[in-house]
Image (cartoon, rainbow, N blue to C red):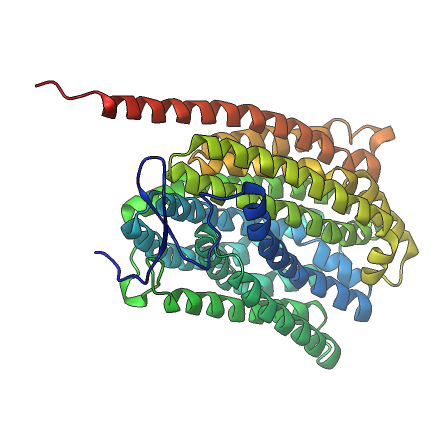
Amino acid sequence: MEIPQKPLCNTVSPTGKAIVLMKSNVDMCRGPILRGIIRYTIPIILTNFLHLAFNAADLIVVGRFCGSLSVAAVGATGALTATFVNLFNGMSIGTGVCVAQSAGAGSKRQLHRAVHTTVPLALLLGISMTAIALCFAPGILRVMGTPEDILPLSTTYVRIFFFGITLDLLYNYSAAVLRAIGESRKPLIFLTSAGVLNVALNLLFVIGFKMDVAGVALATTLSKLLSAALVLASLMRRTDACKLRLREMHIYKAQLFKILHIGIPAGIQASLFGIANITVQSSVNSLGSVVVSGNAAAANIGNFICTGMNSVSTAAMNFIGQNVGAQNPRRVRQIYHTCLALVTVVGMAMSALLWIFARPLLGIYITDSPQAIDYGVLRVTVVGLSYFLCGMVDVSSSSIRGMGVSVITMFNSLLGACGLRILWILTVFSLPQFHTPVGLYLCYPVSWAITFLAHAITYRIVFHRWVDRIHGAREKEAVPAKV
């Protein structure tokens, strides 16, 4: 069924297919690449910064009004919540690739089906994750060795947090649809509104109602409700093939298979980092609650840098996805190298600023423990200055997924990120002379460097095989049929 359309901004791919682009969206298939990527990426960076501001507001409010133990309680849940969220949110990467390739190929019908498969899929996954997390998360916190003095607070935070995870998935999956067609500004507007609500509710629940970590968890959940409602309403108001009609929601097998084919390995890959970080967090926990507090604050600040770089990788995936659909190898190669250079510059610049202003930034989170701030500075020095390597890993893996290949990046991450970090902890960190925060934190730059090398090699192989398939198909079409 064809969907009624307003006039679209149509370009033409090398294969002669129409590329469906709204006039308000960034045109990913033509024009200057760097300018287009920057225009597209800036709203995503700001959006992701606001998303991180949810957690930052949590830590800042509890640090200011509840103390360093509450900061440690929230921080100790970070690796656990990230593992669950990354596993299921990774599926939205499959949505993005599916939508981007359909847009590049000019298929309005496939766009319509991808959108109407995405929303019910997010609902099902969210409900499933809530049930799983509520059953197992408290026990996992104990297995991680969460200190007894913060375990009750950490358990309370986790339970309330996961009640709202379905709303988080609805927002992320729907926002992935918008970004895949070049619309990166509306998610920024939606998350800004939710961020303001989150901060206001944090202050109300913590200061006014004295709810401690339960208050910040509840504030986060209610703000997610607002962001999910806004992004769904935006899809329902559209007039093109991405318009969401609630009555037409249906899980189409072809779109589901494509989303799962890309999304499941991407989700597993993202969760592998979380699993490795749970191991690291367990090792941090073994060093005491003061180290946990400093580590939590430094990691939260560092997440802003990683998120800024991850925004570039989102651009790489969607730009490459649309140009794969348009069958434009030359532009795909240019996008990859441009994003790789851009993420390196952005990562180095932001890491340098973080290192210079580490103490005053950490002082925003921690007000009652100078020693915890010292440990936070230590993490910033060892891990923060190598964040650009993490950005290079993300761009390379996202570029490969944009070409429709996801399983190999999962295995690269399994060996490079998860495997190496766990091996490091079991070997190097177990030695008495390296059983220190520095000895632990060195596992990050080492694993990032090796994983990037594996992804870079994989990208070259996948790219050249894809180009060979295109050339083979075109040569076959050019051969006249025998009479």
Residue drawn at 69 percent across, 79 percent down: 204
Left or right: 79 with respect to 67? left
Provide residue 190's location: percent of width, then percent of height.
54, 67
Q: Closer to the camera, 209 or 90? A: 90
Left or right: 390 with respect to 239? right
Vertical comparison of 83 with 405: above or below: below
Q: Closer to the camera, 222 or 228? A: 228
- Farthest left residue in view: 483
- Farthest right residue in view: 370
Provide residue 455's location: percent of width, then percent of height.
57, 29
The C terminus - image quarter:
top left
- Farthest bottom residue in view: 208
- Farthest top residue in view: 482
Vertical comparison of 151 with 276: above or below: below
Is residue 120 among the parts visible in the rendering? Answer: yes
Vertical comparison of 423 with 149: above or below: above
Q: Closer to the camera, 383 or 143? A: 383
The N terminus - image quarter:
bottom left
Residue drawn at 51 percent across, 36 percent down: 399
Task: Identify the image quadrant of residue 328.
Answer: top left
Residue drawn at 53 percent across, 67 percent down: 227
Provide residue 198's location: percent of width, then percent of height.
64, 70
Provide residue 285's location: percent of width, then percent of height.
76, 47
Left or right: 99 with respect to 202? left
Residue drawn at 38 percent across, 22 percent down: 468
